[in-house]
Amino acid sequence: MRTTLVCLTVLFGLLASACADASRLQQSFEPAPMEAGGPDGSATAESRALPTVPPSAPPMQPSNPSFEEPLAGTCPARWACETSGAASATLSSEVAHGGNHALQVSVPNERDVYTLRSARMPAQPQRTYVATVWRRSSSAAAGGESVRLLFYDAQNKLVGSQSERDGEPEPWAWGGVSAKADSPMGTRSVAIEITVQGPGRTVWLDGVKARDSPILEVWGGTGVRRGESSDTLTLQVTTPTPGGVHIGTIDAFGQHLAVRGSARLESQDGDRLAYALAGSAKYQADTKTIVVPPGQPATIHITGGRFTPTPGTGFPRATLGDPVAGASFPVFVAAQNFSDGSSGAFELPDRQAILTAVNQLGKYLDGRRLPDGGWAIAHPYWPGQLREDPQAIAVITQGYLYRAQSSSDATYEARARQGLEWLVKNQHSDGGFGLPWPFGAHTGHFNTRLHYPGGADSHRAGDPLAVVTIAAGSALLDGFKVYGDSRYLAASARAMNYLLHGPNGFQWLDANHTRGSIPYCDLRPVLEPDDPRVAAHAVLPAVRNSSVEIYNIDGAALSFMKGLYVETGDKRLLTYGDAIAANLATKVRDDGSIPYSWYEPSPHSGGYANISYTGLFEYGGMRGRDDWVATAGRGFSWMANHARTGMVPTEGYASVYGLNLSLDVSRYVSRTLVKQKADGSFTGGTATRTDAVVFGILSNLLLNMGG
C-alpha cells in the first residue's frame, strides 16, 4: 500500500478553524524528553556512544528545585508565588518523587490558580532551553498545569516567553510537564514559571530541571535517495547559536555512524562510509566533529552504504549528536524513490474504529440537514449564526462521495447528490461562491476600511471569495468524476471561469506576463497606503496593495486547475497555471518555508503551507517541471521538521517518491479519533467546517482501505 490518505488539499488548511498553528514547540518532547533525558537528567538511548568530549557546563539550576526547604507561608523558599481564590500549597513527605518532599498544591474551585516562579538564572541568546517538572495529579482533566520559560535582557526586561500546557494526565501517577523554547537575541537570564489551575484537583510538584543546548535547524531539502550501488543521505542544517553545533554522530535507519576523520564515518559494525561537506560545514580535528558555524547553511552528503527507511513513513527520523554540547537533535528525512513492495497491511489503522467514528460523525451531520438540501453550519467567528456555508457543504459532499464509493448503502449517494445539487443551485450567476456571513475586520479579514466599499468594515454576506469558490468547484469536479453528470462539470468550469476571468479573478503580476496570482477577494487596498510593505510589493501598480499573492489560495487553485485540465484538456488553463506556479515557486525560501502572503512573512500555519506545496507539487508533476516538484519537495522537508502537525500524508507525494505512508496515516488517525465527542462531532458543535474536514479525510481513508 503506497498510501491510504489524500489530504483534501484544496480544502484542508484553508479553513482557519481546521488548521492548528504548527510550531517547533508542538513537536516538543513528551514527559521524559529526549533532549533532557528524564527530569532527573538520566541518559536516554539516543545519547549513547558519543565521542569522549567534555560537555559544556549545564546552566544554573533553579534554587530549591525539589522543594526540600521549609515553606514561607504557602510558597517554597527562594521561589516567588501568586495565588487566587482558595488555592494553597503545603509540603508533603508521603508521595515525593525524589528526595524527601514534594510541593502539594490544592485548587478546589474553578478560578483557583497557584503560580510559582523561580529566580532568574543566567542564560545566553540563540539557544534552546527546556524546563521540566515532575507532576502527580488527582484528576485526569486536561490543561490544569503549565510550564513557562521567561527570557530577560540585561536590563531585566522581558524579551520573550513560551509555555506548554499539559494534556490529560494519568491520575495518581508521576509524569513530566515540559516547556521548550529558543532564547531571543539579547537574552541574559531565564526564569521558570509553573501554574496549577482548578477546579477539583490536588497536584504534587517535584524535581524542577533546566537544560539548554544549541539550536539546529533543517535548512532546505534533507533526504535519502536510493541509488544503484549505494544510497545518498543528505543533511542540510543551520544554526544561529554562537559557537555553532558540533556533529559527532548520526543515528539513522538503524545505523549508528561516528565521525572518524575529515571524510570518513564508521558504523557500529565497523563499516566505513564516506561524507562530503558543502556550504559552511567544516571538519574539526581536535573534537573529531563536523562543525556547523552560525549564520550559514551547511550540507553533509553521506555515501557508501544503504539507508532503508522505516516501512510506512515518508519522513523517517534521524538523530544528530553533539558531544561538545552534550545534546542530540532529531531530524526528519524525506525518503525518495523507495518502494518496498509490501502491502503494509500490518500498519493499517483500525478500520472498524474509523468506520464507527465516521458513522457517528455522519449521524451528527445528519442532524444539521435542512429541507432545501443544505446543512446548517456553525463557525466560531459567527457564534450562534447557523447558516448554509458553501465551503463546509463542499467538504461534506466530498466526504459522502467517498462513502458512496466504498459502501453499497444508498444513503451515501443520496447525501452526496444532495450536496452537489445544493452547490449547483446556489452558485452565483458569475460562477463564484461566497460565505453566508459578513466577512470583515472583526472576523479575521483585513483591518483597513479602505478595503471595503462605502466605508463599511466587512464584505457583504455572499460576496464571492476565491477560497470558497475553489472549494465548491473542486467538489463539483469530484461529483462529475463519480457520477458523470455534465451539469457538475459545467458548474465546476463556471467556478474556474470566475477565478480566471471574473472582475476579481486572475491578475498578471509583471509586465512580461510571466507571473500571476488569483486574489483572495478583490483588488481594493489591504493595508494603509503608507505602510512600508506596500512600496516593497514588487508587482504591477494596478495590483499592488491588493489581495493577490496569498500563497495558499494560489496553491489550492493549482490543484483545482490540474484536476480540471485532466478532465477537459482545456489548454487555456495552462497559461494561467504556469504563471501561478512560476510565481509560487519563487516564494519558497531557501530553508523550504513559505510566507503566508506578500504582506505577512510567517507561514501563518502548517496547514496553509501544506496547501501551497501540494498545489505546486501536483501541478508541477503534471507539467513535467522537475524544478517545481523539487521546490515543493523542499517545502515538505521543511514541514516535516518545523510544522509536522500541519502535514497529512498525500497520494501525490507518495506516488512521486515511491513511498509507503501507511504508518504516517495510522498515526494521524490515532491522534484524530481520540478527539471525537459524545455527540459524534469533533468540535462540540462550534465549528462544523472542521467536522466536515475530518469527515472527508476519514471517509477517503475508508475508501482507500477497501470500503
Image (cartoon, rainbow, N blue to C red):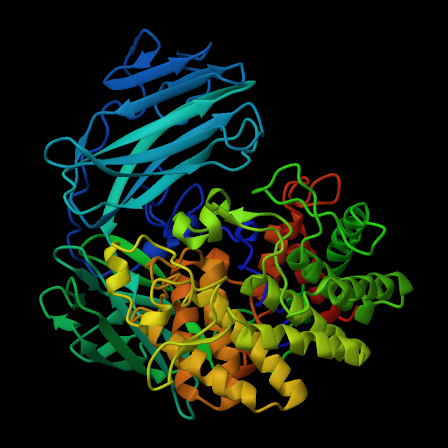
Query: Which part of the image, by quadrant, shows the C terminus?
Result: bottom right
Q: Is residue 119 above or below residue 9?
A: above
Q: Quadrant of the N terminus?
A: bottom right
Q: Total marks drawn?
A: 0
Q: Position of residue 675 (x, y in %)?
A: 63, 45
Q: Image check: 253 left or right of 62?
A: right
Residue 624: x %, y % from top left? 48, 91
- Against 180, is 143 above or below? above
**How far across and how far down the image is residue 583, in percent?**
38, 77
Q: Is residue 570 left or right of residue 507?
A: right
Q: Is residue 635 left or right of residue 676?
A: left
* Residue located 25% across and 54% down the image: 530
Q: Residue furthest front?
A: 454
Residue 254 at least partly seen: no
In the image, 196 versus 206, the foreground residue is 196
In this rendering, does residue 79 appear at all? yes
**Residue drawn 31% across the image and 52% down it:** 528
Residue closest to the eye, 316 or 110: 110
Which residue is more in the foreground, 371 or 252? 371
Determine whether 350 is above or below 272 in the image.
Answer: above
Q: Nearer the viewer, residue 140 or 26?
A: 26
Q: Position of residue 694 (x, y in %)?
A: 66, 55
